[in-house]
Image (cartoon, rainbow, N blue to C red):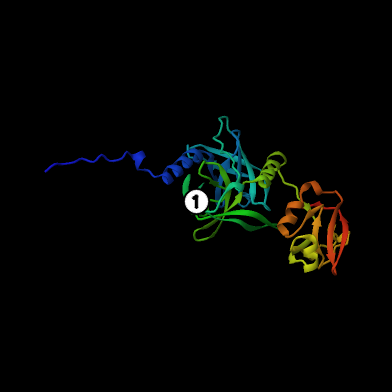
Amino acid sequence: MELRFVSLPSEEEALDAYSQTVIAVAERLSPSVANVRLRRGGGSAVVITPDGFMLTSAHVVARTRGGRTSFVDGRELEFEVVGSDPLSDLAVLRVGDESELASAELGDSEGLRVGQLVVAIGNPHGFTGSVTAGVVSALGRSLPTRSGANVRIVDNVIQTDAALNPGNSGGALADGRGRVVGINTAVAGVGLGLAVPINAATRRIIGALMSEGRFRRAYLGIAGGPRPLPPRLARKLGRTAGVEVVEVVEGGPADRAGLRPEDLIVELDGTPIEGMDELQRVVVSELIGRAVRARVVREGRERELELVPAELDG
């Protein structure tokens, strides 16, 4: 009887493409993810510059000005909160250290596709450098946020089935090349995690927090919601909806401009408005103190009003 010996694959050969990708992302990104430790609770943060700027969730550091971070290499460093923006659930921290930190590369969530591999790195329950993997299970989700009496919807939130647990908040959600495309923010249910996207809008927020310690937003002083346009007006404007004014804050910019409940906003500063997401994108810091035209429909008739947005007191 002839014996045949079959050579077994090497350990590297035995790893499938999925495993190799997750391992590569973990090895590249884990040194950039810190465990944020506070007196009560904690979370995670991602180093975004070699000189110590870090990105985390605003709710992680909501009641503190500083604390301690720890890294997978054993270093423990003090941090201070540079700036926080609860309405995007993003905050920037700064640690002081003589040696350079390993900084992560920020990607762009706009290129993500449903079903794409993503890797989450953070510190669930304080376990430093924990790695989970999954896919983008949905895009374009909305996340309500609050700062005092102000409520805002974060657009284009990433939904993933990569396991997230308490302590993952503020950690990295990375694509298959190790680029950070989101900051993990919430557990929406079993197998459902949400991450604030890294895109052009959030990069502006991050930049402002790093340089000014805050992000300025314009304020109209209304509460509203989407409402279908009357058929005749929809045909004329070439779109189907606008934003109905539900409530006007007394003494606010909209009130001073003459906006009323039940007015239907269809255009602001030359930009068509079909929903609250478009309205939020238009009402930016550049409009603060500047007179802008609002095109509204009142009792079936179009009219123009001039209003001057104020700065939102966050």
Q: Taking 213 as reference, is 244 above or below it?
A: below
- Viewport quadrant of the N terminus: top left
Q: Taking 199 as reference, is 248 above or below it?
A: below
Q: Taking 246 as reference, is 46 above or below it?
A: above
Q: Picture coordinates of residue 307 (x, y %)? A: 86, 55
Q: Picture coordinates of residue 76 (x, y %)? A: 52, 38
The residue furthest front is 235
Q: What residue type is disc 1 on? A: Pro
Give me the residue at 34% from left, 43% from top. 14
Q: On the rendered structure, is 37 left or right of 230?
A: left
Q: Nearer the viewer, residue 37 or 199?
A: 199
Q: On the rendered structure, is 49 left or right of 212?
A: left
Q: Label 1 crowding class (10 Å Cα cut-off): few <14, some 14-19, many 20+?
A: many
Indicate the quadrant where residue 105 lies: top right
Q: Picture coordinates of residue 73 (x, y %)? A: 47, 37
Q: Is residue 60 visible?
A: no
Q: Picture coordinates of residue 132 (x, y %)? A: 47, 49
Q: Which residue is mark 1?
A: 124
Q: Is residue 22 visible?
A: yes
Q: On the rendered structure, is 194 left or right of 210?
A: left
Q: Nearer the viewer, residue 154 or 234?
A: 234
The residue furthest top is 98
Q: On the rendered structure, is 268 left or right of 199?
A: right
SS at badge 1: helix
Q: Nearer the viewer, residue 96 or 300?
A: 300
